Amino acid sequence: QVQLVESGGGLVQPGGSLRLSCAASRIIWSIYVMGWYRQTPGKQREMVATFRSDGEINYADSVKGRFTISRDRTRTRVYLQMNDLKPEDTAVYYCNLRGDRDVWGQGTQVAVSS
């Protein structure tokens, strides 16, 4: 069974930075996408940034230029460096691994407030 463990959320002031980490217990697919989504109350979960197994990266327009997704050498960990955070970035951030099915992490709260 594949499990995802996230860390790195917290409270930060506008303009600040946070780094999220996600570790997969194992990856059983040769073609997959691993990345970050976020959700606020009453809204649908939205894609933030994803890293495909072939190296393709995608960002939501709202975070381009501020957030950077990366992965480690083993490709079982992804990171989300979030800079110049804004109050509208406040959400629960979920790590996702998508092969022939979706695997989700437990979520980590990011709050941007002065």
Image (spheres, helix red, strand yellow):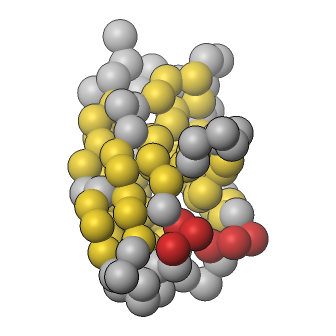
Is residue 6 depicted above or below 112 in this figure? above
Check the picture and name the quadrant holding the N terminus: top left
Q: Position of residue 98 (x, y in %)?
A: 59, 30
Q: Position of residue 66 (x, y in %)?
A: 54, 81
Q: Position of residue 58 (x, y in %)?
A: 68, 61
Q: Residue at x 42, y 84 (%)?
A: 14
Is residue 66 depicted above or below 77 in this figure? below
Q: Residue at x 45, y 21 (%)?
A: 28
Toward the viewer: 23 or 45? 45
Tally the marks. Answer: 0
Would residue 39 appear left or right of 18 to someone viewing this image?
A: right
Q: Residue at x 31, y 75 (%)?
A: 12
Residue pushed farthest right?
A: 61
Would residue 32 appear left or right of 79 to someone viewing this image?
A: right
Check the picture and name the quadrant holding the C terminus: bottom left
Q: Position of residue 99 (x, y in %)?
A: 60, 25
Q: Residue at x 46, y 79 (%)?
A: 85
Toward the viewer: 112 or 85? 112
Q: Does the rendering let one see residue 16?
A: yes
Q: Does the rendering let one see residue 72?
A: no
Would residue 34 appear left or right of 58 to someone viewing this image?
A: left
